[in-house]
Amino acid sequence: MSTYPQVTGVEIPFMKPPLLLIGQGSHDDTGAAEFGRFVHRLRCRLEESAAEVSGGYLAKAKPRLSESVASLVARGHHRLVALPLSLSRMGEEFPAAMALEQERHPTLMYDYGRPLGPDPRVLALLAERLAEAAADAPKLRPIEEVMPRLRVVPSVPVEEPAQHIEMGETAVVLVGEGSTDPAANAEVHRVSRLFWETHAYDFMTVETAFVSVTPPGVPGGLERCRRLGARRVIVVPYLLFAGGMLERVWAQALAYGAGHPDLDIRCAEVIGDCEVLADVVIDRYEEALRLAEGVSA
């Protein structure tokens, strides 16, 4: 079947429903900039398949979700795929926000794409960030140089030779955002276990911690690893993009490390804007289209 409907003898490309990425939103410019770059990457990827890509935030940052939806509707799109750009399960705020948009635009129809985690490719990206952090040589730097781009929380002074630490003496702390939703927090614990068994099985353990809202915090996760006998701990943020949340992870790790100089603490980077993450999003988008077609059929 041709995807190019014939209108008065002219072949017009079939337009897929646009992909609308929904971000939580914050006042942090770094996270907003990375979100914008990722939206641009997806536009370039989906351009050949005649699918528009837009992005909007629920609150705090711009463009707001309401602005992005209004722009799509003004350009003649009345059906779209809404995909929360999130690693955790979809909270109630996402359906509530889209229901409000439907009230504003009665002709609007939408389908949801599944959140991104814990896709095996996301776990593989976490493994890459873990390997990068493990390969970094610790360096002692003053806090004013470390923040906001801390990569290593050192415990060995520069003038002393670095100790050799085996993989079995190294623990990992996977840090999620933290939520008031118990199911969302349980999902992060599940990801930690999956990550340990599929990508970090040579490490002593993979513990779970949260940036805020729910315990244990980053210091609590580090303390558990220390009590288990770890000589080195690598903190892996379970976050998509850099920004204020990541800086809080690093700051908590730095503060704990200052009180435990014998423990080598390292901090990994976030998953970040990359082609593999774009692959996961595109698969979620295509999946939502297939499910919608199956329901309509």
Image (cartoon, helix red, strand yellow):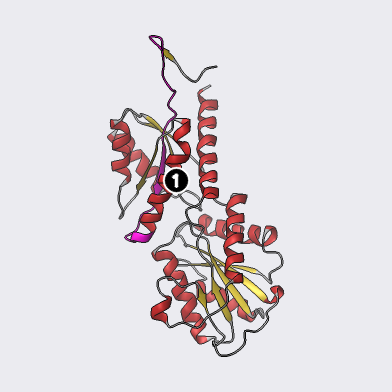
Residue 163 image position (x, y, % from top left): 65, 84
Magenta span: 7-30
Location of the N terminus by quadrant is top right
Vertical placement of residue 36 versus 238, above or below: above
Vertical placement of residue 199 versus 19, above or below: below
Vertical placement of residue 188 versus 51, above or below: below
Residue 252 image position (x, y, % from top left): 46, 75
Which residue position is annotated with label 1?
Answer: 41
> Badge 1: how crowded within 10 Å, few (<14), some, or many (20+)?
some
Residue 112 in view, yes or no: no
Q: Nearer the viewer, residue 36 or 168?
A: 36
Q: Please give left or right for residue 172 compared with residue 167 in the image.
A: left
Q: Nearer the viewer, residue 231 or 108?
A: 231
Residue 75 image position (x, y, % from top left): 30, 30
Secondary structure of the residue carrying tag 1 is helix
Residue 78 in view, yes or no: yes
The amino acid marked with disc number 1 is: Arg
- Tell which residue pokes out farthest to the top in this image: 8
Residue depicted at x 62% and y 55%: 124
Vertical placement of residue 271 versus 107, above or below: below
Q: Please give left or right for residue 8 compared with residue 74 in the image.
A: right
Question: For the image shown, how many numbered marks are present on the structure?
Answer: 1
Magenta stretch containing residue 180, yes or no? no
Residue depicted at x 67% and y 81%: 229
Q: Nearer the viewer, residue 264 or 65?
A: 264
Magenta stretch containing residue 15, yes or no? yes
Residue 40 image position (x, y, % from top left): 40, 45
Residue depicted at x 52% and y 48%: 275
Residue depicted at x 65% and y 74%: 170
